[in-house]
Image (cartoon, rainbow, N blue to C red):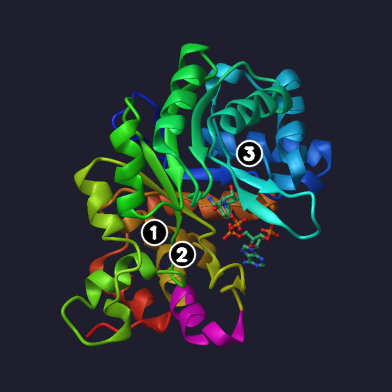
Amino acid sequence: MDRIKLGDSELEASRIVLGCMRISEMETNALARHISTAIDCGINLFDHADIYGRGECERKFGRLLTTELNREDILIQSKCGIRQGSGKDIQYYDLSKSYIIDAVDGILERLSTEYLDLLMLHRPDALMEPEEISEAFDTLYDAGKVRHFGLSNFNATQFDFVQKYVGRKLITNQVQFGPAASHMVNSGIQANTPFDGAADRDGGLLEKSRLDNVTLQAWSPFHYGYFEGIIMDDPKFEALNEVLDDIGRSHGITKNAVAVAWILRHPATMQTIVGTTDTSRLEDIAKAGNVRLNREEWYRIYSAAGNMVP
Ligand SMILES: NC(=O)c1ccc[n+]([C@@H]2O[C@H](COP(=O)([O-])OP(=O)(O)OC[C@H]3O[C@@H](n4cnc5c(N)ncnc54)[C@H](OP(=O)(O)O)[C@@H]3O)[C@@H](O)[C@H]2O)c1
């Protein structure tokens, strides 16, 4: 599988990343097999967040790191900034200096590692002070705890806002993108039309990220809406499933792999973070790395997902 440099950094990471948000329920041996299959498929980057499984995902991965894996052979990224409040069902964001620093200490302890290759701030905090973020990043970098920094779910202006104060170049932005969550390309495709899709929801994030050499990491490639469900075999996406099947047959890959190939084909050279806990599905998905869709195939998938090509 191809590797790319993340942003302006020296980190060389696989185009497909294994998301570890769902691994807390996996049995230890199955998880060990899953991770080693990922590595055999060429995946060398593993995505975490402190909130996944309320810390259990990092803890489980950390146990493998001390027994089965060689830390220097893989890259690990994690995220912080989403907090559970003391009140029932209260979730809030916290990108204060002290919270970021404490969160990273917790992450490193659970992962049983001395450093993260990459830390990302999980979501924009309406109360964030970029000077504080900058101080937190400097403290973590100077202590050798984090090698690189990025953001997640930030729009183009928010990204610039934080970057202006952070001395180090931010290298990634992790955002939702997939055949049925294509908002990042819709406004460009429908530019200069009166149609709803022309509305700019993220400040031209796609083009801005390319101009600034920030690597976009696409999360939840098989989802539609905001965690409403997955497209595979959903009757609401019958046309899309048929097209994915058809294109998959011609390339000898599964529908899942075609959906990932659709993301990888975009010239922004995005990464795709897949969250499957099914090891044979992971092996199938990894084949997307060997397939380059042509333009007609790319637009066929885009249209079949219900999008307009004016
Ligand atoms: N930054 C953020 O805000 C953010 C938000 C969400 C996620 N993420 C990251 O992105 C990663 C991926 O997210 P995700 O797991 O939600 O996305 P995903 O890879 O799109 O979806 C995975 C889910 O879809 C199921 N699935 C996939 N193909 C299927 C098929 N053909 N038939 C039936 N079920 C199928 C999987 O089940 P199986 O396990 O059975 O395959 C799994 O439950 C996460 O692990 C996390 O690292 C980041």
User: Label 3 sits on what residue type?
Assistant: Thr
- Crowd class of label 2 (few under 14; some 14 to 19; many from 20; radius 10 Å): many
Q: Residue at x 38, y 75 (%)?
A: 301
For the magenta stretch, what is the residue range? 234-245
Residue lying farthest to the top in this orientation: 143
x, y percent for residue 69 = 66, 22
x, y percent for residue 232 = 59, 73
Q: From the viewer's perspective, is 64 left or right of 225? A: right
Residue lying farthest to the left in this orientation: 192
Q: Residue at x 62, y 41 (%)?
A: 49
Q: Is residue 222 magenta?
A: no
Q: Quadrant of residue 99?
A: top right
x, y percent for residue 122 = 53, 45
Badge nearest the viewer, 1 or 3: 1
Which quadrant would the C terminus be assigned to in this image?
bottom left
Q: Nearer the viewer, residue 58 or 205?
A: 205
Q: Residue at x 40, y 31 (%)?
A: 131
Secondary structure predominantly adopted by residues drawn in magenta = helix
Marks 2/1 in contact by CB < 8 Å: the verdict is yes
Which quadrant would the N terminus be assigned to in this image?
top left
Q: Quadrant of ligand 1?
A: bottom right
Q: Which residue is mark 2?
A: 259
Q: Which residue is mark 3?
A: 37
Q: Which residue is mark 1?
A: 263
Q: Is residue 42 visible?
A: no
Q: From the viewer's perspective, is 133 left or right of 308? A: right
User: Label 2 sits on what residue type?
Assistant: Ala
